[in-house]
Image (cartoon, coloured by chain):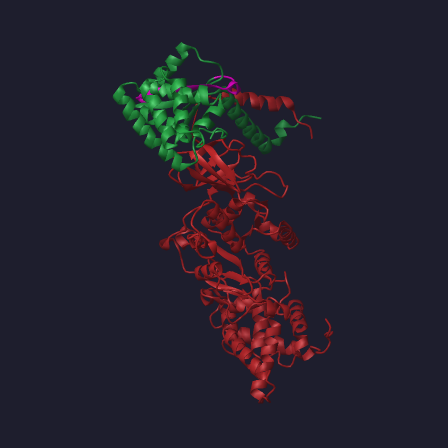
Amino acid sequence: MKFNADEIASVIQAEVEQYESHIDVREVGTVLEVGDGIARVHGLSGVMATEMVEFPNGVRGLAFNLEENSVGVIILGDYLGIEEGQEVKALGKLLSVPVGDAVIGRVLDPLGNPLDGKGPLNSTESRVVEVMAPGVAEREPVTQPLQTGIKAIDAMTPIGRGQRELIIGDRKTGKTAVALDAIINQKGSGVKCFYVAVGQKDSSVAGVVQVLEEAGAMEYTTVIVSGASSPAPLQYVAPYAGTSMAEHFMWKGEHALVVYDDLSKQAQAYRQLSLLMRRPPGREAYPGDVFYCHSRLLERSVKLSSELGGGSITSLPIIETLEGEVSAYIPTNVISITDGQIYLQPDLFFAGIRPAMNVGISVSRVGGAAQVKAMKNVAGGLRLDLAAFRELEAFAQLGTDLDAATQSQLDRGYRMVELLKQPQYRPLGVVEQIMVIYAGTKGHLDKVPINDVLRWETEFLEYIRDRRSDVWQIVDENKDKGDAFKSPDNPATQAVVAALNEFNSQFKSGDTDATA
Amino acid sequence: MAETKHDTVFDTGQQYLGSVYAKALIAASEKAGETDAVLEGLQSLVDDVLEQAPGLESTLVSPRVPLEAKENMLQSALGGRAAPTLLTFLKVLCRRGRFDSLRAILRATRKQYNELRNRKEVHVTSADPLTAENLEATANRLRQALGCDVDLQVKIVPDLIGGLVIRVGDTVYDGSLANRLKTLRNDLLATSSQQIRSELDRFAAAE
């Protein structure tokens, strides 16, 4: 395509003719010292806390520390081009990021600049990064479920829209995988997803983006990246920026899911800034307000009242622990802020139980109210049953002879554990989950060998999809009714039991290759 | 201090020290009625002597040079030329070993003296040297606008191309041609790229 130079010239001419020169008034200061992502500035006497400032090379900063003789500025960008003696201009504005439909499907840095090479962001709206969370009167209890598509989570630690559910565990225990499955499962549900990568390797983030693209999840997802190589101020700001983008949709009455991967890195970035700013270090050298840093972020995950449109932000913060140490400073902080946690354990992970969720100490404090009714009825006793099974299992290892009742309880427990395993990036619909868990808890799997449980599940779901979609329909219609699956004569129960019996009669056990 | 690019100190201790000595110097020179001469002498000592001959400053600061030698040096160099209060003050500085804070003291003195006379320090930057009339007109306008007397500090920066940049405290009033060109350029880029993005067809040439 060729451009018409005359037309461009006419636009420029019109602009020049309209140009009114007026004297530029600005509040300034002088850079005293600069380094490690922060600058100390003399002057700027009228600057306000967290006001934006601009350096001569166009890099922005935030007034972070207001001291008697100088202002501590955190530099949001490349600080290597900034020199001592340069003029710093106060902009009289707060940091804001572009929001709206234009950000969906994009990979952005915390300031909203595109990183994916798909051209500039055509966004006309923007939103302030640091906003106070909505107050008590503006909220509503969390009642709508947010399906993660992971059987173990939806059954035992259900997440509601507007809830904050922490995902905590050592490195390499599948924390990101749980969050990604939750994002992938939002396809078609209208929930906008935001994946905030803080201090991650750029290669892992590239992997995440690829997974989301392959699953078709980038159509409703925004990835906000401040990688391990970006300066600490950007890592510190990234979660707030992602939340702002999500809030835009929340205030429009839509639902959003934000994943912060991970907040321990953000705390470390904040610690670095605070120490460089000479704020006094506290426990583990974190500054005194590191709790506030996380609490004000997570308070912004809200279910708005119906007068305000009923939008919500659900957040899945991730915390990485060291050697399972949940009583370290940052993990305890975030555990106390969130409405529950999903605890992932390396020994379960290596025993092949994936997702490696420790059912005993994972909780959801909102949980039940936000669970699909039918699922609540089906999975109500599952947590306790599994806990009892764990105890029995430990006891059975002593090699004592067991009576028939105990043995059958053990057998069912083994099958349940097997049934709750789920491959990565394969979230299940809620109806499928209900049917499978019903089968497991009611003993319809007791005759299936343990090795065959996963194959049984796949084949059963295939069978329902291909031949008995009427059963699927019945369960789907009844899933929000309070009495679904409560009694044997419930229509949903009858349909599922009939389908199970039919399928079990033709299921051939022992076909599974033991090595598979 | 001489190697930094800005005229402020990072050392808050020295800044505080400067303000204490400045208070004393102003009080003493007000009593003698020669504050203007003292201030001018101090400024010229820093600008014309110490900046030109850095060796002199290190001699006066050095603890290895005996006090009498320093005092004799000051007496012979400035005696009769500088205001008596200034000479005495400099000798006091040598005796107390505070000669290294001279620049902080000068800044603080300027500031306090302006406050005392209800004047504001105004930095005027221009592209070309200003004529006396221009300077007077600028000062008059500033006096009207600020409602107090002004202490004009003029600097010539040819990069401004034209116009004036006036700085009062931390506020800068930028009417320079360079800045106007810069904003024009930014506005042009923003509006043209936005128009091209929104109605691409208009700009496409017929092939």
Tell me if residue B154 is in the magenta stretch: yes
Residue B52, placed above or below residue A281: above
Q: Percent from the top left, x then y, of residue A483?
A: 47, 73
Residue A151, placed above or below residue A444: above
Q: Residue at x 60, y 22 (%)?
A: A9
Residue A434, placed above or below residue A74: below
Q: Percent from the top left, x then y, of residue B94?
A: 38, 28
Screen quadrant of the C terminus of chain A: bottom right
Q: Nearer the viewer, residue A294 or B159?
A: B159
Q: Percent from the top left, x then y, of residue A286?
A: 46, 53
Q: Percent from the top left, x then y, of residue A302?
A: 44, 55
Screen quadrant of the N terminus of chain A: top right
Provide the residue span drawn in magenta. Answer: B145-162
Q: Residue at x 59, y 74 (%)?
A: A417
- Residue A485 seen: no
* Colour applied to chain A: red
* Colour applied to chain B: green
Task: Say left or right for A125 vs A106.
Answer: left
Task: Say left or right for A503 vs A341.
Answer: right
Tell me if residue A516 is in the magenta stretch: no
- Residue A461 seen: yes
Q: Nearer the viewer, residue B100 or B174?
A: B100
Q: Nearer the viewer, residue A302 or B34?
A: B34
Q: Residue at x 47, y 57 (%)?
A: A284
Image-quadrant location for residue A137: bottom left
Q: How many marks?
A: 0
